[in-house]
Amino acid sequence: MLPGVIRVGIIDDDAIIREELGFLLQCHPDEFELLFEAASMGQFFELLNLDKKPDIILLDISLAEQNSLDQIGKLKRLLPDSRVIIITGHTEPGFLMKALQNGAQGYFVKNSRPERIMEAIRETYKGGAYIEPRMASSLLGFFQGGEGKQEGKSRISNRLEGLEPNLHPREIEVAEGLASGMAYKEIAAANNIGLNTVRHYVKSLYRKLGISSRQELIELLNE
């Protein structure tokens, strides 16, 4: 490895994303070395060489059947000198806050300009914390009290409680995720619960509200 070259590992279950990120890194061999591209945590452990540890791990926030946010602590215990950058398609501030609270050092949104991943890796490698520029105001809002997010949650919570006062808090969290367009695995990651648990609460939520789809839920919330 050349002096100053940053070793990078990718954990993402989207083959296209892995290919795109890998291609970008390999276009700069004097600056980056791609150690592995894993589609799951299991494959990551198979590919990991403890004699050649990554400096940076790019971790998808919503691995299939797995809560990626819970994996950050495990990665940090196994690789204490590695720094984790979450890669995701979501710009909701709740994802960002949970990622940072769980130990991530960076947060990169996948639909950003491709060259920004290089900036994210460089900044994080140097000891900084890369946060997607468009999310800076959201983060500030959380530290100042999170007024915007709380108002959004309050509106949905109040509406749901008006429709059905016996909803479980998890059912309300799941409803908020569904209303914002999140996939089940993304709701699981955002709320630190399993995918099957999300499915359970979706079924119970729909049953209590007398609906059968996400679209009906959205229409009900907007009535």
Image (spheres, rainbow, N blue to C red):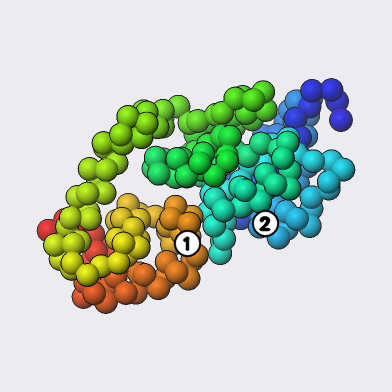
Q: Quadrant of the N terminus?
A: top right
Residue 158 percent location from the top left of the image? 18, 55
Identify the secondary structure beneath mark 2. Answer: helix
Residue plotted at (67% across, 44% down): 76
Image quarter of residue 199: bottom left
Amino acid type, mark 1: Ile
Q: Nearer the viewer, residue 78 or 89?
A: 78
Which numbered dot is residue 178?
Answer: none
The residue pinned by badge 1 equals: 193
Image quarter of residue 157: bottom left
Image quarter of residue 28: top right
Q: Is residue 155 visible?
A: yes
The residue pinned by badge 2 equals: 41
Sequence-wise, the earlier of marks 1 and 2 is 2
Residues packed near mark 2 inside 10 Å, few (<14), some (14 to 19) or many (20 plus): some
Identify the secondary structure beneath mark 1. Answer: loop
Residue plotted at (36% across, 70% down): 201
Task: Examine the rendered structure and indicate whether residue 71 appears above or below residue 131.
Answer: below
Q: Nearer the viewer, residue 205 or 118?
A: 205
Tell which tag, 1 or 2, sits nearer the viewer.
Answer: 1
